[in-house]
Amino acid sequence: MALSTSSNFAKPDDAFRAVVEAHRGLSDEQSADLDAALVLILANHIGDLAVLREAISLAQRRMADASQQQQQQQQQQQ
């Protein structure tokens, strides 16, 4: 199974909203715990280590890209 990066939801905004709503009222620590639990539950549901590794790599690249963009914006503001 290959990692799917296109939306598989009929209503992707509703899926996003459900995740955001799940965090409403939680502390930062509780929110991080929810995210960790959700990741592990969904990783188990996928059940494919190669896909999980690919998803981890993609998430790490996106975090690095976002960090780089933030640094560039800060430099432009100075």
Image (spheres, grey):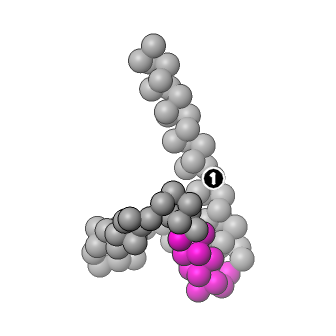
At x 49% / y 34%, what residue is drawn? 69
- Name the one closer to the observer, 54 or 44: 44
At x 64% / y 84%, what residue is drawn? 44
Instruction: Look at the numbered disc 1 and give the secondary structure of its residue.
Output: helix
At x 67% / y 81%, what residue is drawn? 48
Q: Quick one: which residue is furthest to the top in this view?
A: 78
User: For residue 14, which quarter of the picture?
Assistant: bottom left
Q: Position of residue 11 (x, y in %)?
A: 27, 75
Q: Which residue is mark 1?
A: 60
Residue 60 in sight here = yes
Could you tell me which quadrant the N terminus lies in?
A: bottom right
User: For residue 78, which quarter of the picture?
Assistant: top left
Q: Position of residue 73 (x, y in %)?
A: 45, 26
In the image, taking residue 67 as reference, residue 53 lies left or right, namely right
In the image, taking residue 65 as reference, residue 19 lies left or right, namely left
User: For residue 3, which quarter of the picture?
Assistant: bottom right
At x 65% / y 73%, what residue is drawn? 51
Q: Position of residue 62 (x, y in %)?
A: 55, 49
- Name the one closer to the observer, 1 or 16: 16
Count the numbered circles shown: 1
Residue 3 in sight here = no
Instruction: Determine the main secondary structure of the stretch shown in magenta.
Output: helix
Q: Indicate whether 57 appears above or below 38.
A: above
Please name the amino acid that badge 1 sits on.
Gln
Would you call the spot at circle 1 few (<14 residues within 10 Å), some (14-19), or many (20 or more)?
Answer: few
The span shown in magenta is: 34-48
Q: Indicate whether 71 appears above or below 15.
A: above
Q: Indicate whether 3 appears above or below 60.
A: below
- Name the one closer to the observer, 2 or 17: 17
Query: Is 45 covered by the magenta stretch?
Result: yes
Q: Indicate whether 69 appears above or below 50.
A: above
Q: Position of residue 28 (x, y in %)?
A: 51, 57
